[in-house]
Image (cartoon, grey):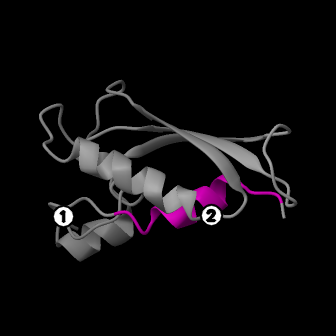
Amino acid sequence: MTLTEEDVLTALRDVYDPELPVNIVDLGLVYRVAVAPDPDAPGMVPRQKVEIDITMTSKGCPSHERIIEQVRNRLAGVREISATAVNLVWEPAWHPERISTAARQQLGIE
């Protein structure tokens, strides 16, 4: 099976912001997912390396290390992923408009 960006986003929907009952994908914290073959990875299945750009709701977010650790741990459990790089980015700045419609309804802001 070839891993897709959507597969990675589906896995990341298990990672929640500790301050809100919403996953980081629906909060709009995931800015970019890149999946590429990893020909040097050991193992029998096709292995992929993943690079992710994420942001936080604010630069002062006390949970950023915890969220990044959860992302790494969650993706480590995906059999097709051989390596994960998580980049914390601040541009463009996160804005509440990035929250999905379903998450807005869940939070009662729509």
Label 1: which residue? 20
Q: Which residues are magenta?
A: 2-15
Query: Label 1 crowding class (10 Å Cα cut-off): few <14, some 14-19, many 20+?
Result: few
Q: Position of residue 104 (x, y in %)?
A: 27, 66
Q: Is residue 53 left or right of residue 36?
A: left
Residue 32 lies in magenta, yes or no?
Answer: no
Which residue: 85% across, 60% down?
A: 45
Furthest-top residue in this view: 91
Q: Residue at horizontal 45%, vertical 57%?
A: 73
Q: What is the distance, in whole Å, between disc 1 and disc 2 at their CAs? A: 25 Å
Q: Give, as a three-letter code, the residue at label 1.
A: Leu
Name the kind of residue labelled 2 in the image. Val
How packed is label 2: few (under 14 Cα within 10 Å), some, or many (20 or more)? few
Of 83 and 29, nearer the camera is 83
Q: How many marks?
A: 2
Give residue 76's position: percent from left, percent from top: 55, 57
Label ID, residue 59: none
- Dividing the picture into quadrants, the one containing residue 13 is bottom left
Quarter occupied by the C terminus: bottom left
Inspect the magenta stretch and tell me whether residue 4 lies in it: yes
Q: Position of residue 2 (x, y in %)?
A: 82, 58
Asked if disc 1 and disc 2 are in contact, CB closer than 8 Å, the reply is no
Q: Secondary structure at mark 1?
A: loop
At numbered mark 2, what does the secondary structure look like: helix, strand or loop? Answer: loop
Give the mark nearest the N terminus, 1 or 2: 1
| Relative horizontal placement of residue 18, taking residue 32 as reference (left or right) | left
Seen from the viewer's position, the closer of residues 33 and 65 is 65
Specify the label residue 78 is tagged with: 2
Q: Residue furthest front?
A: 42
Q: Is residue 14 visible?
A: yes
Q: Which image quarter is the N terminus in?
A: bottom right
Please say whether residue 33 is visible from this viewpoint: no
